[in-house]
Amino acid sequence: MNKPEQLIFPWSKKSKAIFEHFYLDDLNSPVKNALLNQDDLFLYGISGTGKSFLLQSLCNYYADSKKTSLYIPINEIKDFGSDFLDSLEELDLICIDEIDAISRDDNWEVAIFNLINNCLISKTRLIFCSQLNPSTINFNLKDLFSRIKKIDHLELFPVSESNLREALNFIKDINSYEVGDNEINYLMTHSKRSIANLVRIIDDLDQLSLQLKRKITIPLIKELIQR
């Protein structure tokens, strides 16, 4: 495991996520700095805030720096068994997403606890991620709960209502989506006003416009929303 790159496993393709493609408003500005320093971190926040994107961005950042990293989405790898974590402490960085999914699973809790201990010895950096504040996760293993609580934790907040339009235009420009101001206005008026939902719709619109060879217009948006 000493090849300097992000390791890729069967459950996922290599992500193109990079920090420059993530919209950070002032409230979330400490997040990037925390991820780019060398300390362990527990990042939490509600669904749709972009936690997974940031973890994958960090893995790609490490790969560009010729360091080894691994992004682990717990819900997708639990069937591999907790032995999957054996010897991962040889890496430079391990990002574990959805850590709350192993709560009350004794085998996985012990494996995570051992991984933390091994990483302390090897100086491997650990980043944990969850929708839950670490203090509210009900681990059976009290030693694991204690170790997790000692890790610096930081909340990733959803994009505020006042910044939604700016965030949407940022993402539109980054991805070269051909969406006009009128269409953006319609989307923000007739869709759920969350950045995750709006980005998903714009991405779907882009794919649909290519498939149908039509520009993104309000009628096309109506057609997609009504599906």
Image (tube, grey):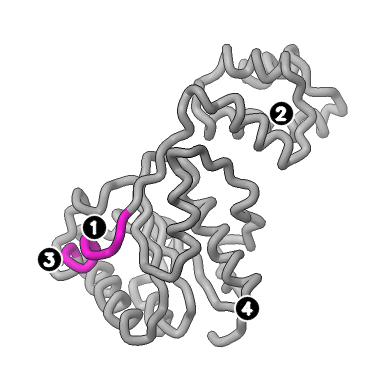
The amino acid pointed to by label 2 is: Leu
Badge 3 element: helix
Left or right of 149 in this view: 186? right
| Residue placed under numbered mark 2 in the picture | 205
| Residue placed under numbered mark 4 in the picture | 66
* Closer mark to the observer between disc 4 and disc 3: 4
Quarter of image, res 7 = bottom right
Mark identifier at residue 142: 3
The residue carrying pointer 4 sits among few (fewer than 14), some (14 to 19) or many (20 or more) residues within 10 Å by Cα, namely some
Label 4 vs 3, first from the N-terminus: 4
Label 2 vs 4, first from the N-terminus: 4
The amino acid pointed to by label 3 is: Lys
| Residue placed under numbered mark 1 in the picture | 103
152 inside magenta stretch: yes
- Quote the CA–CA distance across marks 1 and 3: 11 Å
The amino acid pointed to by label 1 is: Ser
- Quote the CA–CA distance across marks 2 and 4: 36 Å
Q: Nearer the viewer, residue 183 or 101?
A: 183
Quadrant (top left, top right, bottom left, bottom right) of the C terminus:
top right
Position of residue 171 relative to residue 183, above or below, is: below
* Closer mark to the observer between disc 1 and disc 3: 3
User: Residue placed at 52% from the left, 73% from the top?
Assistant: 69
- Quote the CA–CA distance across marks 4 and 3: 36 Å
- Quote the CA–CA distance across marks 2 and 1: 38 Å
Label 2 vs 3, first from the N-terminus: 3
